[in-house]
Image (cartoon, rainbow, N blue to C red):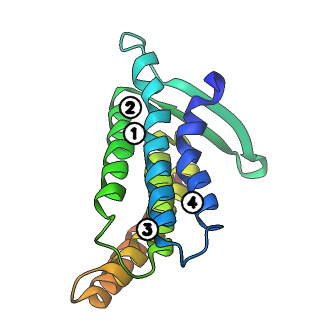
Amino acid sequence: MNSHLLSWVLFTPLIGMAVLLVIPASKKNLLRIWANLAGLAGFLVSLPLAFRFDKHAEGFQFVERADWIPSLGVKYFIGIDGISLLLVMLTTLVGFLAILSSWSAIEERVKEYYAMFLLQQTGMIGVFIALDFFLFFVFWEVVLVPMYFIIGVWGGPRKLYAAIKFFLYTLAGGTLMLLGILTLY
């Protein structure tokens, strides 16, 4: 686990989501309990990052690198520095607290809500630890999909208007980001 600690932190919410999808939708309390356990596990798995991070070392730490799409030069390349460490720790802590605080607030489509939330948490962690432009772009887009559904299904009174506006703005921003990455490539 020590050599791939960052990958464990990244994929713990995704593993929690995969197990959540197996639980029947009719068992709302079991879904809530499992989502809270997955959120807590995500935070607990990230704690060793804070304790093992050497604040006096230069550069990125906990670096992992593997070829992903070698023909394009795209790599699974992740690591953290001091700022991304704080952002990852904040994401895992606030993610757990947000899942816990939605225990009684979400009454319809409970399974889908928690699945979207855990997928979004995986994407946010990925955005903070990605050291490859294309990998960053993939995680950025992963964050936007569940956010669209969270806004559109569980949002406020004008949720559809807000979801469509969110989609249009993020589509424009994502397109410009992809063009910038391709220009740099």
Q: Amino acid at mark 1?
A: Val
Mark 3 or mark 1: name the one nearer the start of the chain. Answer: 1
CB under 8 Å between callouts 3 and 1? Answer: no
Name the residue carrying label 2. 85
CB under 8 Å between callouts 2 and 3? Answer: no
Mark closer to the observer (3, 4)? 4
Q: Left of 165 or right of it: where is 115?
A: right
Name the residue carrying label 1. 88
Name the residue carrying label 3. 144
Where residue 149 appears, as percent x and y from the top left, is 42, 78
* Mark 2–mark 3 distance (CA, rounded to whole Å): 22 Å
Residue drawn at x 48%, y 43% as measured from the top left: 42
Mark 4 or mark 2: name the one nearer the start of the chain. Answer: 4
Mark closer to the observer (1, 4)? 4
Mark 1 or mark 4: name the one nearer the start of the chain. Answer: 4
Element under disc 3: helix
Q: Amino acid at mark 4?
A: Met
Mark 3 or mark 4: name the one nearer the start of the chain. Answer: 4
Where residue 103 appears, as percent x and y from the top left, is 33, 64
* Mark 3–mark 1 distance (CA, rounded to whole Å): 18 Å
Question: Which quadrant of the rendered structure holds the N terminus?
Answer: top right
CB under 8 Å between callouts 2 and 1? Answer: yes
Name the residue carrying label 4. 17
* Mark 1–mark 4 distance (CA, rounded to whole Å): 18 Å
Q: Nearer the viewer, residue 42 or 135?
A: 42
Query: Where 104 sits versus 156, above or below?
Result: above
Query: Where 24 sits versus 57, above or below?
Result: below
* Mark 2–mark 1 distance (CA, rounded to whole Å): 5 Å
Query: Where 109 sits versus 117, above or below?
Result: below
